[in-house]
Amino acid sequence: MQEPAKNATAPRSGANPAQAHLLIHAGDAGHGGSSRLEAHWQRLIAFCVQKPPSEHERDRLLVEIHDMHGNEVAAFDDAGALLDIALPEGTYRVTTRRGLVRRAYTMTLKAGGVFDLYLRLPPCAT
């Protein structure tokens, strides 16, 4: 299981070329359908902007990643705006939860590829 990320994680240098990268964009406003340039800007912004610690349980973003056999491969109990997870090629199920909203996504990752998953989440409470 990987350590929770408070903000963006840097892509892993020297990563195994047989691995894929799952980039989970967890900003409050979804950017689905954005261009590659916009996605790079969002990664840079997420890396530079610190997310203040959540004071409310309902604000925390929980992310779990399971393989198709049901084995947990990663979990984050207070995910930041961007997660970069290196995984072996395969099909995975990502489950997210913020407050009472729970969503699940299934995707197939190819070796050496990058998969951008833009979460559509409810805004944090203020």
Image (cartoon, rainbow, N blue to C red):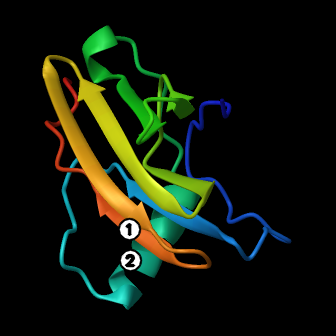
SS at circle 1: strand
Q: Say which of 69 and 81 sits in front.
A: 69
Figure label count: 2
Direction from residue 100 to residue 17 in the image, left or right: right
Q: Quadrant of the C terminus?
A: top left
Q: Looking at the image, is mark 1 or mark 2 nearer the viewer? A: 1
Image position, residue 46 (x, y; %): 48, 58
Image position, residue 11 (x, y; %): 68, 66
Earlier in the chain: of badge 1 and badge 2, it is 2
Residue at 40% over, 33% down: 63
Position above or below: 28 against 34: above
Q: CA distance from mark 1 to mark 2?
A: 9 Å
> Which labelled disc corresponds to residue 116?
1
Q: Say which of 121 and 87 sits in front.
A: 87
Residue at 75% over, 63% down: 12
Q: Amino acid at mark 2?
A: Ala
Farthest front residue? 69
Residue at 43% over, 77% down: 41
Direction from residue 118 to residue 81 in the image, left or right: right
Q: Amino acid at mark 1?
A: Asp
Image position, residue 92 (x, y; %): 41, 49
Query: Mark 2 — residue?
Result: 39
Quadrant in the rendering for residue 38: bottom left
Q: Residues within 10 Å of mark 1 (few under 14, many from 20)?
A: some
Image position, residue 72 (x, y; %): 52, 29
Position above or below: 61 against 54: below
Tags 1 and 2 touching, CB below 8 Å: yes
Residue at 74% over, 77% down: 17
SS at circle 2: helix
Farthest right residue? 14
